[in-house]
Amino acid sequence: MDLLERDHEISVLTKAFSGALKGRPSFVVIDGGTGSGKTELVHFVSRLAARASIPHLRVSNSPMNASVSFGVVRRLLHQAGMDGVISPEPARRLEAMTLDTAAAPEDTHELPRIELGDRLASVLSDAVRETPLLVTIDDIQYADAPSLALLQQIIAGWRGGGLNLVLSRSPHFPPADPLFHVETLRSHLYTRLRLNPLSEDGVRSLLSFHLGAAAENASAAEYTKVVGGNPLLLRCLIEDVKGSASSGETIVAGSEYQQSVLACLRRCNRTTVEVAEAAAVLETSRRLRSAAPLLLKCMFNVSARHVEQSLCALEEIGILSPDRSFRLGAARTAILSTLTPERYRSLMVRAIHAMHLTPGQNHRHETIPALLSDGRSNSWTVELLLDSAETDLAHDEINDVITRLNLALDLSADETLRARIITMLARAKWRIDPMTAAQHLEDLMDAYRCGLLSVRDSLTLMHLLTWSGRVDEVARMMERSSGEGTGALQPEIRSEHELLMCTFPSLRPLVLGSTAPDTGAGPGAPLAGVRARAGTQLARLLTGGPREEAVATARHLLKTTRPSDATFHVLEAALLILLYSERCSEARTACETLVAEAEERAMPTWRAVLTSRLAEIALRQGDLVTARDLAREALAILPPRSWGVAIGDPLGTLIMSAVLLGDMEEATEHLHREVPDAMFQSSHCLGYLRARASYHLFADSPHVAMSDLELCANLLKEWGMDVPGFHDWRSPMATALLRIGAQEAARDLLQEQLDLAHEEDHRVRASAFALLAQTEPLPGRPALLKRAFDLLLPHGDDFSMSKVALGLSRTFHELGDLEKSHAHKEMAERLASKSRAGGTPRENGAKRGPGTIASLTKSELRVAELAAEGLTNREISRRLFITVSTVEQHLTHVYRKLNVKNRLCLPRTLTTGAGAGAGV
């Protein structure tokens, strides 16, 4: 099967060989790309010679042979002397003539070369007088020019007997002597064979031969497409399939295929190898990939024609497709694996230069290679990289951004610029995984102490430190900033400080010690002014401030602002304003929209935080199953260590929803998760502490629950944030007091809650009335319970309404009104069932059908693409700058959605369809 679809070529070669046996000379040239079967046909002729017991002289060339003058001829003469084709003495004399000619000045080569050619032709004529001679030269395009000139001279003047000369070559690489091909065409001995790629039928036959029944469902058209009809690549793909769990229906491009790609490239000239390397590097960037055909012609110090020849060669080999993209991502992976970091950086820098230079500059004195050889170009290169990174960031190409910034960091020596680059790196990495961003904290702290950070970069550092729980360092930074200049912070900076204060309320005295001019926040206010007030409005709301202005600001922001590094925390604050102002439905709709956008833009951290907030909203609405599922999802998007102090939010929601659903096993599991100590200094601990208290109440440990609730109360009072609409600790505390028989204390606490609660805090007030009913004599309970039910009814909190309805049922039963008791019991069961059934699907989320690639998120798709290419989880994590744990979680989701068992079963369309990764 090695010579499948080569019947015509075999017939021509056999006829030429038979003619040589009868004394008729022949000259056959086999044209074909690397891996097309040229060498197999040469071996076929060799076997004919072996069976006929005739002499065979053979030479195989590689790109390095082109620089060895008379190298091909000398090797032929050496073998001829060793095999007795030519007498040893004439062979040595001819070898000596080649050495003398090669050593002579170039302008004196002509006459000695002609004499050498005549003598060589004469010796060969004598050699074939008695018996035919087969001479095969593989990859003639890499033969040296003097040897080609001698061969051309011998072919043109041959008058001897049965010489069978068989040459193979790649048509995309002209020989060192351009006249060789033209002149040999004139010879009456010349026959040319052009090897075509395997047809689809040929591919099907080869699949059937090697894979048998396993290949029945294999797509021959798909295999043909991914190897371009190259027999070598196809055979290696088949070997990969044999070594995997695949049946052959799914293409598996493993180590055999990757090694065959590299073997093909080793048979190519240096320009082609460089073009392949550059193409692989360009495909790691979505933006560069789109301009790859143009960029490749501008990146090297060779003509566009030579680059085009290399591209054609790579296409014919079957590595590139006609649009100059890689047919299989595994080929790109194989090439990238051979690049040193320095080589990768060099090619990426060349690509960035090519992207920014105009065509006129590329072809005048400012060529890219010349620019890169000039040491003074580094500063310009860094600026280009930063500019490109900003553009990529605007297009959410985070992996490209990180690549550009790492290159810029390697090239930059200026400390201020390096501080700026590191800050940009931290911001970009935070979008993907905050734990990777935290790796830059110490460098940024050093830069801050040296005064190298801008105001914006200092704010970024504060947010990173806050996320990591390093509040003391944030406090020192705030003291320094408020003590500089006039002491008045700009409104935007003050707003950022107040956002940080909402996370760590202990910072409140530092923030309140600064003053800032008021900024309008109405619909006609400048957008920057509205953003500046978001932190201020949230901070005021949490301390009992007015709601109307805060809600107006939040609505305006959510309507007009797109998520970015500068606005994400502002938008989160706007959601919290709506949530704490009892606009839960409005907050949910806005949050669903933001989650869908974060998912579409492949921003794991944004998506995780927003999904956690969405879970919190669902919990407040009594949508328990949805709250639990969303909290689970949030914790699956980021590994636990990446959450920092913010882990209290999704963990608290998950524990609380599990307790309310009666799933104490899951609640216990999550309570045993380790949380950072710094979390208990932040507002993220409040939901967690209340959830833990509810767990202990369910476990009938009211005193343990009370200790957690007392901690909540003390923190909120210390921070000046004891606002029931923000955090209701009094209701569960009253429940615990009722459990231990302290009815008066419970009544006083509930009355205090009603006095503090805003009139719009329907859920908080309803909870207070329902619990107060338990402190009243039996006849007075129905009125309080009905009041609680009426407060909840407009807001659709089915779970809370079911509890109140159950209380009414029990109360009426005790009063002897069995009809009302039964009616309220049925209502309670109906509402409880509804609350446990889960909410409706997110209307604004991405709608994807199960079992299809379209069902994958952008992050899952990038991970799946790389897994399908054969990368390990660790390699994927390094490529996408995410943790191995995140890779594993994404793959688990991918396998479930696509209904496959492992990466070997991932569909081929992952690497040939929707955009590759190099890429999470």
Image: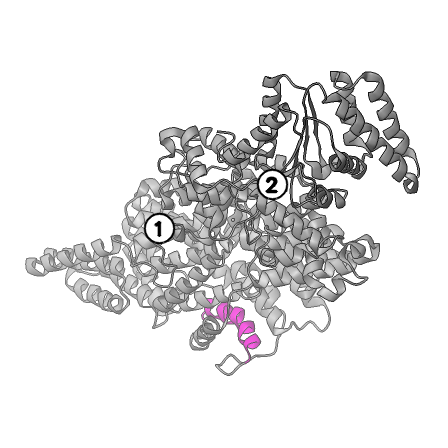
Rendered residue at 64%/54% (across/down) = 425
Among the two numbered marks 2 and 1 on one chain, the one whose residue lies closer to the N terminus: 2
Q: x and y percent of residue 877 in the render?
A: 55, 43
Rendered residue at 34%/57% (across/down) = 619
Q: Is residue 805 magenta?
A: no
Which secondary structure, mark 2? Answer: loop
Q: Is residue 541 magenta?
A: yes
Q: Can you tell which quarter of the image residue 665 is in? A: top left
Chief secondary structure of the magenta span?
helix
Label tally = 2
- 551 or 89: nearer the viewer: 89
Disc 1 crowd rating (10 Å Cα; few below 14, some 14-19, many 20+) is some
Rendered residue at 44%/63% (across/down) = 594
Which secondary structure, mark 1? Answer: helix
Q: x and y percent of residue 291 in the render?
A: 61, 59
Dot 2 and dot 1 residues touching (CB under 8 Å)? no
- Residue 689 visible from this viewpoint: no
Which of the two marks, 2 or 1, is nearer to us in this view?
Answer: 2
Q: x and y percent of residue 94 in the render?
A: 85, 25
Q: Which residues are magenta?
A: 526-544
Rendered residue at 91%/33% (across/down) = 103
**Looking at the picture, which amino acid does disc 1 mark?**
Asp
Q: Which residue is mark 1?
A: 629
Left or right? Give the position of 535 relative to 830: right
- 183 or 210: nearer the viewer: 183
**Which residue is most to the bottom?**
524
Q: Which residue is mark 2?
A: 33
